[in-house]
Amino acid sequence: MPIGIIVHGGAGRFLDNEYPQALAACRRAVETARALLQQGASALDAVEAATRVLEADPILNAGYGATINRDGEIELDALIQDGATQRFGAVAGVRRIEHPVTLSRWIMERTPHHFLIAAGAEQFAAEQGMPLIDPKSLLTDRQIRGKHADTVGAVALDLQGNIAVAVSTGGVRGKLPGRVGDSPIPGAGGYAENGTGGASATGMGEGIMRALLCFRAVELIHDHQVQSAANAAIDLFTRRFDGDGGIIMLDSNGQVGIAHNTDHMPVAWLDGDKIKSQHTQKNAESRT
Ligand code: GLY
């Protein structure tokens, strides 16, 4: 079985001087996941580790440096899903969690539930020994100042053929307090199914939820190459759901699909032994 990993740092528009940093974070996330997968770690381990790298980067809209809501506060959402069982863990509206992807995994593996929100999710985290941080420690000057891209995500394939997906986000800037987008919703913000593939979406969450974009995209793999599936999913998202965003995909052979209708979407992935990344302007992509 080949291994596979693909990550994105969010669809949207990055400042010219910030785009290289976003791309470098994606490449570091792939490096981290590749090392784990080569040692025989699970796809779940790989997507969690990759997403933690992305959550730690202040340029990206997840974890440290995530965007703020209307009241200037951070509210974080995340998802992890195991393609072997379709079990998932998700959190929404957490404020005192440094790595929401890890809390999502703990919910999946340590509770009979799938989805915890806000204070209840934080209470569970504390009960399990996860430090609760000061939400202000996740804020950067940059986030308070300005606009940035959306969400991070990762899809991996391990040596046993298991596929997993993880997604993490601060959501959309200026959102109403309590608003939850697509990212923690399986089938919308992410989806993984062994034997078929996995997908992680980024962009305007209201449309991605209505489209159930990642489920649709993975279903398309049954009849299409994975890149065609990604293109078809974003075409449909653009035409029928009037959405801005993008998707990364990985099939059960380790092939990747990448599509977006935004100016930017930093992506990195494993191609054989090499880490590739996408220097992308819409309609003018180069891959190295
Ligand atoms: N795609 C992230 C969100 O809309 O919250």
Image (tube, helix red, strand yellow):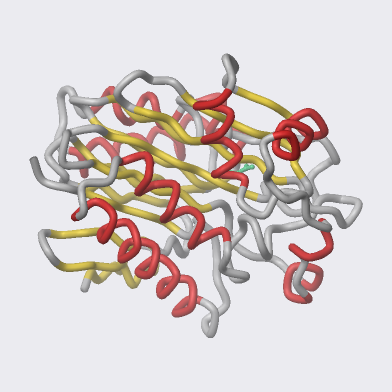
Residue sitting farthest toward the right: 71
Quadrant for the N terminus, please: top left
Residue 43 falls in image quadrant:
top left
Q: Is residue 230 above or below residue 111?
A: below
Q: Is residue 110 above or below residue 164?
A: above
Which residue occupies the foreground of this view, 13 or 166?
166
Residue 135 falls in image quadrant:
bottom right
Which residue occupies the foreground of this view, 135 or 265?
135
Q: Residue at 22% x, 48% y: name it.
A: 256
Left or right position of 192 against 252: right
Instruction: Give the x, y percent position of residue 63.
Output: 64, 56
Residue sitting farthest toward the top: 112
Instruction: Give the x, y percent position of residue 285.
Output: 29, 67
Q: Is residue 260 above or below residue 253?
A: below
Left or right position of 176 against 92: right
Which residue occupies the foreground of this view, 206 or 158?
158
Q: Residue at 25% x, 71% y: name it.
A: 286
Which residue occupies the foreground of this view, 21 or 39?
39
Left or right position of 239 against 279: right
Q: Residue at 24% x, 26% y: name it.
A: 194
Q: Is residue 105 above or below residue 72?
A: above
